[in-house]
């Protein structure tokens, strides 16, 4: 760990600051709509009101910094922490001896159409989840399914695992009949889960633009 | 078995102290899903709570870590907000931090910003931060403090926003600090300030389980606040008499669950709201008893402009009027006039009036960007409050005008900390000498340090870059050069060699592309944090994982720059008062300081609100609970403000008191006379269609995080232009074909979606802005509400051409 001093910078800064504290540039006003904020009712109100032109915060060359010693800034290092094992980090964007880095966004692409699967319900194959506890995706076409107070085709098929043309729809699990707050189990789907599409989204058939 | 465990647990523990210790036990409860389908469960996870870092709903998640790595994310069953559920984005949190192009080293631009492929040089933190500090000092020295600008976020943690505000206003002496929240809820703030004298909703999410009617005014909650929509859905399905009315300019998913969807012309909500007020008066449903005690009437300026010109200024001129004058004002908004302006039928107006006027219906009005991103956004907020005040349906369970916020801490950080040019924490303003003095005392800085004049609000800030006034621009937790409207002008502006741009970010973005220095940043579980959600709930999390490579938190970056500016004492607290906790993974900012930085900042920050209705609880309480809704008085949160029954700030015997207006109207709310005024740009022969922009369920803001999550990318990889099938026939385009959307300001190429989730009426195109490959903000108009300065992203005129 090496100490790093920024003396020249700090000095220049301080001079700059003290000169500038007196300079108020003309600013465009962001009008407070109707400044009606509640008063803080500070305890001591007898102190003199601030003058229109703010003075430098403190006299001398250093604003607010009471010390004349240069600011010493340590080269930051990752502090070892006993409680958590080190994490394998993702690779930096350039090889170490390459002096220049060109930033490449993995999501930069041409604007393309979204090609959702056209597979009919019942014909889709289970897709791998983002992680085991993540909700499963809809492996079939959903764009024409509307969930209304009167009809919910997702539930019609998936409740109890409906069998369509030889294939069985993924059944709605017990958790969806359990109020997660009170833990009451009901015969009816937890109504908060009625908007299936908030979690169970379709997927396009296109490959990801980056390698996983 | 599990249920018994949990029930017993609840019996033996006070709900307020259910901390992380319990979550390991409780996490099994939400299992079951995967076991039933034969998917392998991950064993040996340690579970901790963290709020979701996406929308303003503020769900709590349980994060399962193993060997310092996140292996699972699920809804937190202990959270009263989401009660064990998450939307698809919430599950996506698992992968937002490990995209393969994560920024891991400080980078300094080695070529020019106008280079189509700029090259960077890796630098040490010291070199990068010295350069940043040097440029800040030089800009201040040569061009004044206002030339040093910070553009932050409603996704800053509370202490990050607080530290930035303290550094800027109390250290650099610049009021040039703004959050991206200016684009998302400034009109809501100005609406609250003008009507109630105090920001943020009076009600809370508990209203969802009390209301019998929900009116959505420009809020596609089914996609944008999905877990709140889940609660409304529940209410509607369980209490079948509940009515949902979806007011919108384009049919959407929210409308599918609604009992009634009312499509109106852009901007005409102003006429509709006045029309409802008129009908309430004509029907004799005004609650005069409530009005006499709790409201006054005022008239403001009319014909207030659109903020299209540089250095635009607005000053309100208000005068008191009587109820009769108000009634006469709204009487012009007859059903026929409303129909002519908005296209809604007299029957629809009557249906809307029913839910507000009927004394037996408890009604919630809900709104987000449709109302806020509006050249009359403040007025529209006022008009919704007018309706609730006229019938006295406010501040009681289920009767609630509820402004939903977009970002996870737009309330907690942007609004409560006040990271705007004109603000200080806890609703205080820089223009008020007493407020400045109060802040200077808490910050322990000399009187007169904080500049009295606001400098630039967000749009003016980028315009000032173009004018050559802002010389240093630092963005944190935001992506301004994808999210400002009329971007072409500002992207060209920021390429000026004399404006030094710093971007703190986690991935390459449209903003890092324009930066002179890129600072790799820690996020979410890689730091300790605090957010404040839409219902005034403040909630905390502890750091769980390490940031990759050299990435450091925004807080650490701010403090390190402060030190280099000679302002390190702003963040120098007592190590004995705020010791580090043994065994806790502390943030880089705390480790560097040698004391508990977040706690020290919090305890200082909360001094601003204590005793004047913005009370926040001591630090530890938030780590022990799933959050608390302020004001927290004697350890008790407040569910309904301004109501004596729930709010300790209402004096006994008054019933209600809008005490934010104590000084101005003796605690009465203000009903404002606000007119319908047309938008600045409307479709014409050359640009015949409306353009509306917005979000989609699967993506957060500019897509920086969510587009890197495989399942979210695959769910909605590219932004599309949604148009009406008849418009498609007229233009001879088919679903999936490419078009160019062009306005007077710019154009963008995008593929057509017909029959997608958002179904605009004829003559309108909807393009979400999450996709950096579809830069729709090159097309949008940078007109704003003159009062709130919030940009209207919802309407401008465009033409569409088919690309062969
Ligand atoms: S994005 Fe919003 S609704 Fe979805 S999990 Fe996060 S906070 Fe909840």
Image (cartoon, rainbow, N blue to C red):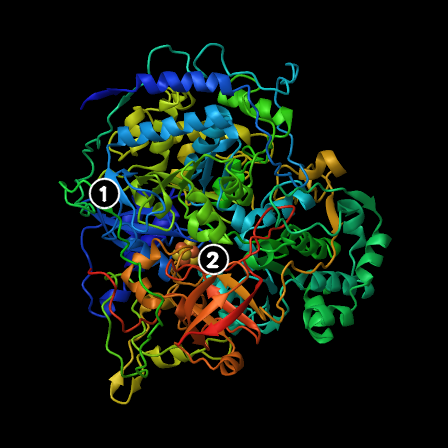
Q: Quadrant of ligand 1?
A: bottom left
Q: Nearer the viewer, residue A124 or B680?
A: B680
Q: Is residue B182 left or right of residue B348?
A: left
Which of the numbered marks, if any, corresponds to residue B548? 1
Query: Measured from the top left, where is residue A14 in percent x and y?
Result: 42, 17
Q: Residues within 10 Å of mark 1 (few under 14, many from 20)?
A: many
Res. B666 in view: no
Q: Residue at x 76, y 47 (%)?
A: B300
| Picture coordinates of residue B758, whole percent (x, y) | 49, 71
Q: Given the image, what chain letter belongs to the residue carrying mark 2?
A: B
* Location of mark 2 (residue): B778
- Where's the C terminus of chain A, which quadrant? bottom left
* Quarter the N terminus of chain A occupies: top left
How far from the left and from the top, in percent, is residue B83?
Answer: 41, 56
Q: Is residue A166 visible?
A: yes
Q: Earlier in the sequence, mark 2 or mark 1?
A: 1
Pinpoint the chain carrying mark 1. B
Query: What number is the disc on residue B602?
Result: none
Question: Marks 2 and 1: which is nearer the front?
Answer: 2
């Amino acid at each position: 760990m090496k100490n790093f001093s920024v003396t020249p910078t700090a000095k220049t800064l301080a001079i700059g600051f003290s000169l500038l504290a007196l300079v108020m540039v003309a600013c465009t006003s962001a009008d407070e709509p109707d400044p009606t904020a509640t008063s803080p009712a500070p305890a001591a109100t007898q102190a003199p009101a601030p003058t229109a032109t703010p003075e430098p915060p403190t006299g001398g060359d250093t604003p607010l910094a009471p010390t004349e010693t240069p600011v010493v800034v340590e080269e930051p290092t990752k502090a070892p922490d006993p409680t958590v094992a080190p994490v394998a980090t993702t690779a930096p964007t350039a090889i170490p001896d390459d002096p220049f880095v060109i930033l490449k966004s993995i999501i930069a692409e041409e604007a393309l159409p979204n090609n959702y699967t056209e597979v009919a319900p019942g014909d889709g194959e289970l897709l791998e989840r983002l992680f085991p506890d993540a909700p499963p995706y809809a492996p079939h076409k959903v764009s024409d399914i509307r969930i209304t107070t009167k009809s919910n085709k997702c539930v019609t098929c998936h409740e109890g695992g409906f069998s369509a043309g030889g294939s069985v729809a993924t059944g709605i699990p017990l958790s969806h009949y359990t109020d997660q707050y009170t833990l009451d189990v009901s015969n009816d789907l937890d109504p908060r889960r009625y908007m299936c599409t908030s979690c169970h989204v379709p997927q396009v058939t296109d490959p990801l633009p980056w390698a996983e | 078995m599990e249920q018994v465990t949990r029930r017993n647990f609840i019996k033996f523990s006070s709900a307020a102290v259910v901390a992380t210790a319990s979550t390991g036990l409780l996490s099994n409860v939400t299992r079951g899903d995967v076991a039933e389908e034969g998917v392998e469960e991950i064993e040996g996870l340690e579970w901790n709570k963290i709020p979701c870092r996406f929308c303003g709903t503020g769900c709590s998640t349980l994060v399962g870590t193993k060997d310092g790595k996140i292996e699972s994310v699920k809804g937190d069953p202990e959270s009263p907000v989401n009660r064990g559920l998450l939307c698809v984005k919430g599950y996506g949190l698992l992968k937002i931090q490990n995209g393969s192009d994560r920024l891991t080293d400080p980078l300094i631009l080695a070529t020019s910003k106008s280079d189509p492929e700029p090259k960077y040089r890796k630098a040490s933190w010291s070199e990068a931060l010295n350069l940043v500090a040097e440029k800040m000092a030089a800009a201040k020295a040569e061009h004044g403090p206002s030339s040093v600008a910070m553009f932050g976020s409603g996704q800053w943690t509370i202490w990050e926003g607080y530290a930035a505000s303290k550094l800027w206003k109390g250290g650099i002496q610049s009021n040039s600090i703004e959050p991206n929240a200016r684009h998302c809820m400034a009109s809501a703030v100005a609406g609250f300030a003008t009507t109630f004298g105090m920001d943020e909703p009076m009600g809370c999410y508990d209203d969802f389980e009390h209301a019998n009617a929900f009116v959505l005014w420009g809020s596609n909650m089914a996609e944008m606040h999905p877990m709140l929509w889940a609660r409304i859905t529940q209410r509607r399905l369980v209490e079948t008499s509940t009515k949902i009315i979806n007011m919108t300019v384009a049919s959407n998913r929210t409308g599918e669950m609604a009992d009634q969807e009312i499509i109106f012309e852009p901007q005409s909500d102003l006429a509709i709201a006045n029309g409802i007020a008129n009908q309430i008066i004509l029907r004799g449903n005004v609650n005069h008893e409530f009005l006499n005690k709790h409201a006054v009437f005022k008239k403001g300026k009319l014909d207030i402009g659109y903020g299209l010109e540089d250095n635009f200024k607005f000053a309100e001129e208000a005068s008191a009027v009587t109820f009769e004058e108000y009634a006469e004002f709204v009487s012009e908004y007859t059903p026929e006039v409303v129909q002519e302006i908005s296209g809604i039928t007299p029957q629809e107006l009557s249906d809307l009036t029913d839910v507000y006027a009927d004394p037996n219906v408890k009604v919630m009005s809900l709104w987000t960007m449709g109302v806020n991103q509006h050249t009359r956004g403040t007025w529209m907020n006022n008009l919704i409050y007018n309706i609730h005040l006229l019938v006295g349906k406010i501040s009681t369970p289920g009767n609630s005008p509820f402004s939903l916020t977009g970002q996870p801490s737009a309330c907690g950080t942007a609004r409560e900390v006040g990271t705007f040019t004109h603000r200080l924490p806890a609703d205080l303003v820089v223009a008020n000498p007493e407020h400045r003095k109060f802040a200077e005392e808490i910050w322990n800085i000399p009187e007169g340090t904080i500049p009295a004049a606001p400098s630039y609000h967000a749009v003016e800030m980028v315009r000032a870059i173009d004018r050559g006034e802002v010389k240093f621009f630092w963005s944190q937790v935001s992506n301004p050069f994808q999210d400002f409207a009329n971007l072409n002008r500002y992207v060209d502006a920021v390429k000026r060699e004399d404006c030094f741009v710093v971007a703190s970010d986690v991935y390459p973005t449209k903003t890092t592309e324009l930066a002179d220095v890129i600072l790799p940043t820690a996020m979410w579980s890689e730091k300790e944090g605090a957010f404040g959600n839409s219902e005034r709930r403040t909630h905390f999390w502890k750091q769980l994982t390490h940031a990759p490579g050299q990435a450091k938190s925004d807080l650490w970056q701010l403090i390190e720059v402060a030190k280099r500016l000679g302002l390190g004492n702003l963040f120098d607290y007592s190590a004995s008062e705020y010791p580090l906790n043994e065994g806790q993974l502390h943030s880089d900012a705390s480790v560097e300081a040698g004391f508990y930085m977040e706690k020290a900042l919090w305890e200082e920050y909360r001094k601003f609100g204590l005793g004047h209705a913005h009370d926040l609880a001591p630090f530890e309480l938030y780590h022990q609970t799933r959050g608390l809704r302020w004001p927290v008085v004697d350890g008790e949160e407040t569910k309904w403000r301004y109501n004596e029954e729930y709010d300790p700030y209402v004096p006994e015997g008054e019933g209600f008191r809008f005490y934010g207006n104590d000084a101005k109207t003796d605690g009465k709310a203000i009903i404002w006379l606000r007119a319908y005024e047309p938008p600045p740009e409307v479709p014409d022969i050359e640009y015949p269609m409306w353009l509306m922009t917005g979000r989609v369920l699967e993506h957060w803001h500019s897509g920086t995080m969510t587009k890197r999550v495989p399942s979210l990318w695959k769910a909605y990889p590219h932004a599309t232009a949604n148009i009406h099938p008849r418009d498609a026939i007229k233009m001879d385009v088919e679903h999936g074909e490419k078009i160019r959307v062009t306005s007077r300001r710019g154009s963008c190429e995008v593929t057509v979606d017909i029959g997608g989730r958002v179904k605009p009426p004829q003559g309108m195109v909807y393009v979400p802005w999450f996709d950096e490959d579809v830069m729709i903000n090159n097309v949008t108009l940078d007109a704003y509400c003159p009062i709130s300065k919030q940009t209207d992203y919802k309407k401008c005129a465009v033409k569409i051409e088919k690309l062969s």
